[in-house]
Image (cartoon, rainbow, N blue to C red):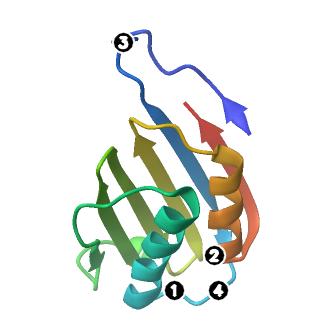
Amino acid sequence: MHRTALTAIAPEIYRKRLLVEGYYRTEVDEDSVRAYFARITGDLNLRTYGEPIVHRTSGAGKAANEGYDGFVPLIDSGIYVAVWTGPRFVSTVIYTCADFDEDRAVGSVRDFFSLAEHEAAVF
């Protein structure tokens, strides 16, 4: 896993960001994106304060970018996911002001989406 300090600004505010990207083998639709949020927040004991918001691009942009994107608000920040259905690629960012087990998070994303190949970075 890549580990890079992003900035030296506001060292008094704890924050952690994890990016996981990879090629998925599972089927993805709006319900599975919602299920991803339930899984990752449950696995990491992260508390939400609202329902996930999930959008399907539905031809609004380039065909190569067709897919889903979603966000779930956390008590301590939020989680975003983007899914490209053509190339079967997923990118998710977990951003919190609370600590979490990044190895467990990567494993959860990898297992949920059945990632064939992936990379992760904490920053």
How far apart are the two marked residues, 3 and 1, measured between alpha carbons? 39 Å
**Residue at mark 1:** 28
Residue 111 shown left or right of residue 69 in the figure: right
x, y (%) of residue 19? 55, 47
In primary-sequence order, the first of circles 4 and 2 is 4
Residue type at numbered disc 4: Thr
How far apart are the two marked residues, 4 and 2, measured between alpha carbons? 6 Å
In primary-sequence order, the first of circles 2 and 3 is 3
Q: Are marks 1 and 4 in contact (CB under 8 Å)?
A: yes
x, y (%) of residue 21? 61, 57
Residue at screen point 39% across, 80% down: 34
In primary-sequence order, the first of circles 3 and 4 is 3
In primary-sequence order, the first of circles 3 and 1 is 3
Few, some or many residues within 10 Å of mark 1 (<14, 14–19, 20+): some
**Residue at mark 3:** 12
In primary-sequence order, the first of circles 1 and 2 is 1
Residue type at numbered disc 2: Phe
Q: Are marks 1 and 2 in contact (CB under 8 Å)?
A: yes
Q: Which of the pair 94/26 is nearer the observer? A: 94
Residue 81 shown left or right of residue 56 in the figure: right
> Callout 2: helix, strand or loop?
helix
**Residue at mark 4:** 26
